Image (tube, rainbow, N blue to C red):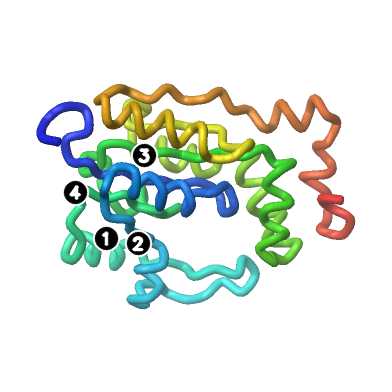
Amino acid sequence: MSGGLYARRCFVVTGTPGVGKSSFARRLAEELNLEYLPLDDILIENKLYTGFDEARESYIIDVEAARKYVYENIRLEDVVIDSHLAMDIISCGDIDLCIVLRCSPYKLVERLRSKGYSNRKVMENIQAEILDVVLTSVLSSCGRDKIAELDVSDGIDTRLETVVNAIKNGERISSDSVDWLSLILSQGDLQRFFPEGLEGGLG
């Protein structure tokens, strides 16, 4: 595709761990015949981190080193980038669209537990999803015009089809309305997701 809404065909798929971004990104790349790029894995493989956070069970990426590596080694065209850090590393002007996947905290709990995460890590990621941490970070890097927020609580198939069709037709993608905080408040579950301590949380 030359010119138009998705001229570079550079798409970022991001979201809280467990929402399904890797599956979504892989299938989006397949549907559009683009390269799939698991950016976070690539950064770790190339040791572009300053250390490992034992409490959060995750690497601390060196953003400046990562940015230098990306711009010297990766062609940001005809690619689907799978990463929760991409918008801290890649300039908004170099992407066509950032897809932020969202998932109900009630369903995300089980997905994260199935990954074998500690209760602390499950709690941290659930709270991040409820408080829109990833979305807020992306918005600080890129305007709303290049962001599509999609609720994939019931799976990725329907939303994936919508995205693929929109991109192929050069159409903008409407964001879903997501407000997990209001949802858990309406269910009386604030204490469940934001307990004073970890013990007994997310029961």
**Marked residue nearer the N-terminal end (3 or 2):** 2
Local packing at callout 1 (Cα closer than 10 Å; few below 14, some 14-19, many 20+) is: some
Residue 104: which disc? none
Describe the element under mark 1 as helix, strand or loop: helix
Give left or right: position of 166 versus 78: right
Identify residue type, mark 3: Cys
Residue 92, position as x, y percentages in the image: 27, 41
Q: Residue at point 34% right, 52% down?
A: 81
Q: Tell how many labels.
A: 4
Q: CA distance from mark 3 to mark 1?
A: 17 Å
Describe the element under mark 3 as helix, strand or loop: strand
Identify residue type, mark 2: Val
Q: Residue at point 41% right, 67% down?
A: 41
Local packing at callout 4 (Cα closer than 10 Å; few below 14, some 14-19, many 20+) is: some
The answer to which of 88 and 104 lies nearer the viewer is: 104
Which residue in the structure is indicated by mark 3? Answer: 98
Give left or right: position of 40 versus 171: right
Local packing at callout 2 (Cα closer than 10 Å; few below 14, some 14-19, many 20+) is: some
Q: CA distance from mark 2 to mark 1?
A: 6 Å
Which residue in the structure is indicated by mark 1? Answer: 67
Describe the element under mark 2 as helix, strand or loop: helix
Residue 77: which disc? 4
Which residue in the structure is indicated by mark 2? Answer: 63
Give left or right: position of 74 versus 165: left
Contact (CB < 8 A) between labels 3 and 1? no
- Give the mark toward the camera: 4 or 2: 4
**Marked residue nearer the N-terminal end (4 or 1):** 1
